[in-house]
Image (cartoon, rainbow, N blue to C red):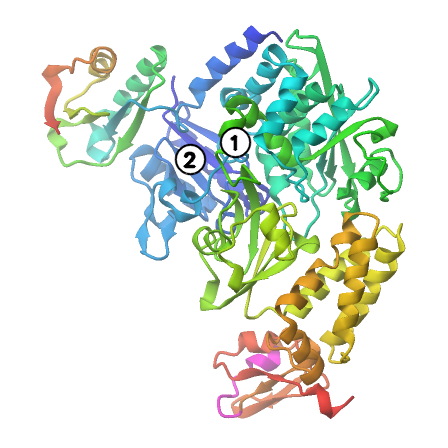
Amino acid sequence: MRKRLDVLVCSGAACLSAHSAAVRDAIAREIEAHGLSDEVRIVETGCMGPCQLGPVMLVYPDGVFYIRVQPEDAAEIVEEHFLKGRPVERLLWEAPEARRIVEERKQVPFFAKQEKVVLKNCGRIDPENIEEYIAADGYAALEKVLTKMSPDEVIQVISDSGLRGRGGAGFPTGRKWRFVADAPGTEKYVVCNADEGDPGAFMDRALLEGDPHAVIEGMAIAAYAVGADRGYIYVRAEYPLAIKRLEAAIAAAHRLGLLGVNIMETGFSFDIELRMGAGAFVCGEETALIASLEGKRGQARPRPPYPAVEGLFGKPTLINNVETFGNIRHIILNGADWFRGIGTESSPGTKVFALSGKVKNTGLVEVPMGTTLRELIFEIGGGIPDGKEFKAVQIGGPSGGCIPAEYLDTPIDYESLRELGAIMGSGGMIVMDEDNCMVRLARFFLEFTASESCGTCIPCRVGLPAMLEILERITTGAGREDDLDKLERLGKTISTTSLCGLGQTAPNPVLSTLRYFRDEYEEHIREGRCRAKECTDLIRYWIDPEKCKGCDQCRRACPVGAISGSPGKPPYVIDEETCIRCGTCREVCPFGAIEILDRGVKGACR
Amino acid sequence: MKLEELRKIREKAAKELTLRGGQVRVKVVVGMGTSGIAAGARDVLAAFLDEIGKRELTDVIVTQSGERGLASAEPVVEVHEEGKPTVVYGNVTPEVARRIVAEHLVNGNPVADYVIEVRE
């Protein structure tokens, strides 16, 4: 019997950790209890995008989108909606501006502005069911290249499409493929770089979890084009769900003969192995990744020779990012011109971004290149919560840079971001508001890159800790007048002299914050003041005697016993020597009596 | 795996995905309010799904709605077709449902005996 309803339960990592599995079980039980098993199908899908609203659920054919579904809601949903056809209004996504109920997924601004190419199947098909992938034109592109195209023609289409590497640097994919195809030798490899490690980035994970076959198909097409018969996916061990679904997908493709020997009886053979990385950031760099794949320590080496000539096990190797492979089948099926019709002249296609930080709708979004930051953050992202002011957005993670409000209308592409001192990176996008200190932000990213440096080259190994030391000095109120010049000089030197991408880009967060928020650095150094009140060494908490009612809540909440006073006898007092400035008292105070003041480090005790 | 087999899997599996954004020509809405269910709307719905499945009509979706206030004519079924007036049927039984699929959805001739309303 035909199914009447498809209930898509998001099983991306975010929804799973919000217990979407329990919701699925509860819905399944209710469906069974109402005798609807023959009519309603439950499908577990990859990430649907709006992660902060999870667990989310999409019901077809009407496209009703439920958010924050709890197991207790299952009975009502099944009884009212699945049986009687009345969607449960209280669980629908409310459009905040109009306060009206939005039923159709298409009408939710979060979805309406997006253009899903790479993520087309994510949240729409069951990633563990190869037949659903095949039904959605899966492996049709592989069939097309194997039966109707020569390897040269495949490379030509990819070149004509203008696709550029989605891992960060934006190197033309077709050119990379051509290098590997032209490299001498018969033994070649295709490697998928799934070592996604930037704080706040989860684009690749979502694609691997939500549509693993798309990556496998992209790799197989690449292998055919460059003449490889073996592929590796280098994925972090800390992505267990992605690994599980990839393993299942590879096994299923094997079962149907879409991987292995003599695929579709065309004489082409290709196989894929998974390799787990331990999570070193540097292993996202291609030469370090290759070393790690070979079982060696993950360290970068000088290029040339490039991996296209001398890569894995010394053989010509094609390395592309997850999202790059995810684009391939769509370009093969729809043509280079179609792809060029999306995005901008120099950066065709779409880009997936992981939106996080101080933005209402955090999650996974895919937009055409050339979309402005304003559209992305304020229309799709819904703007800044709690009525705060937008301050900057950090693009490209620790290798990227921040972009301030005056450039919000910049169309996003590889070149425009580079001009502003950021990079596309793999697509992490962290939004910051007035409560974020830009010096502290720079320090945070530098702490990360300094500890992730592989240590091979001196500029990165020695230079980054030197920069970090200066930043620590500034954020603790001990900054010196010449520190900013030193930071700039060090940063530029490290950028130009480091061996690999890690060191070359690591100073970006510092250099870009210096470029746009120099006054904040100067305030820290000259006045010992942090305007965002984030640098704990530069602030103090103070209880306003006028507002304190002596409720005793702050004293009980203080983890270090720094607050004294007796219930009903205001005011309470904070002992500044003991206080660790964690801010707990301010959060619990029902009267808003606790304020954050400048500590006045400068002049007082130096 | 041969190419033929891949195509067969695709054709078969594509039917499973029609609910999720395929081309929809006709939408059949079965009234599933309390009185609709009491009058046998569940069996009518099942008959629709069964018949549509048998005939492999991939451009038809079946959905349900709440009470329409016409308890005496339940089960009530609406047939929405792109560019045509909406046809409302009353007192539909499983047998009538199968006739609606064959005569109306496939051949384009509404089952006149059971039509209670035609809306532009």
Looking at the picture, does residue A318 appear above or below residue A535?
Answer: above
Which element type, helix, strand or loop, lies under badge 1? helix
Q: In this view of the protein, which residue sits in the foreground, B40 or A267?
A: A267
Residue A222's disc is none
Alpha carbons under labels 2 and 1: distance apart: 44 Å
Quadrant where the N terminus of chain A is found in the figure: top left
Q: Is residue A29 left or right of residue A605?
A: left
Q: Is residue A363 left or right of residue A189?
A: left
Quadrant where the C terminus of chain A is found in the figure: bottom right
Residue A339's disc is 1
Q: Amino acid at mark 2?
A: Glu
Residue A30's disc is 2
Q: Is residue B83 left or right of residue A532?
A: left
Q: Residue at x 34, y 43 (%)?
A: A103
Q: Residue at x 68, y 78 (%)?
A: A522
Q: Residue A57 location in percent, x, y?
A: 45, 40
Q: Residue at x 59, y 11 (%)?
A: A148
| Residues drawn in magenta | A545-556
Whether residue A560 is visible to the viewer of this picture, yes or no, is no
Q: Amino acid at mark 1?
A: Phe
Mark 2 or 1, nearer chain start: 2
Which element type, helix, strand or loop, lies under badge 2? helix
